Amino acid sequence: MTEDEQNKVYNTIGLAPNISMPVKGDASSTTKPAVAAGTIDIRENKSQDISALSRDTANSLNELGRIFDKAKIEEQQELAAVFGEEAFRLAHNLKDDGSGRKIAIHIAIGGIMSAITGAGFASGAIGAGLNEALIKNLKGLDPGTAQIVSGIIGAAAAKAIGGNAQAGASAAASGAKWNEYQKDPRIKEKLQEILKK
């Protein structure tokens, strides 16, 4: 197994949980009242006009159609995850960690990840961007711990702007997992420990 394959295995099974992007959507319907056919006996206020009373019970229920398509949701989450993995791997080739250029790239990647799933651009963008700005402070941490801390940073940043915390956490943790800590030498050691068991 090559070193890159070993790193990929450790990153895939890793110690930190994979945080998936949330998928958002909404739907609504209106149900209108109707009275079934039959005799209406008015006991009080006999002068009421009931001519406008709907008797069409067959068409009163506007049933809410299928809201969520499980396969579509899974595809959106997978697309966001794969996009993030590949894009953050490419971003790793830039050596200037925490620079304005690398922060801007992380903002774009995180934003696109969360936009793919309908969670909005801002949540993923702020999560991934702030995490990249602070990534130098996480150097020296175990990769799994760094991913968890990155997730917390991303969630807090997204929530602070009124966004989706899960989208911010997912983008930030993905950035740490596939970018900063991909070639950490401790990954190789952890992989060897796991493979020996």
Image (cartoon, rainbow, N blue to C red):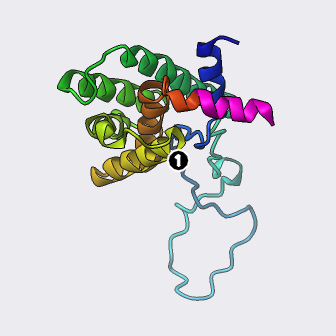
Is 121 placed left or right of 75 in the picture?
left
Closer to us: 159 or 152: 152
Instruction: Count residues near mark 1 (Cα–Cα under 10 Å), then give few for <14, some for 14-19, many for 20+.
Output: few
Q: Position of residue 74 (x, y in %)?
A: 64, 30
Q: Position of residue 119 (x, y in %)?
A: 43, 38
Magenta stretch holds residue 189 = yes
Is 39 placed left or right of 137 in the picture?
right
Magenta stretch holds residue 93 = no
Q: Which residue is label 1 attached to?
A: 28
Which SS type dominates the magenta stretch?
helix
Task: Magenta stretch: give its range.
Answer: 188-197
Q: Is residue 12 above or below residue 83?
A: below
Q: Circle 1 — which element?
A: loop
- Please tell me which residue is depicted at 35% across the width and 53% down the height of the picture: 156
Closer to us: 46 or 13: 13
- Please tell me which residue is depicted at 57% across the width and 30% down the height of the picture: 187
Which image quarter holds the N terminus?
A: top right
The quarter of the picture where residue 188 lies is: top right
- Please tell me which residue is depicted at 74% across the width and 61% down the height of the picture: 37
Which image quarter holds the C terminus?
A: top right
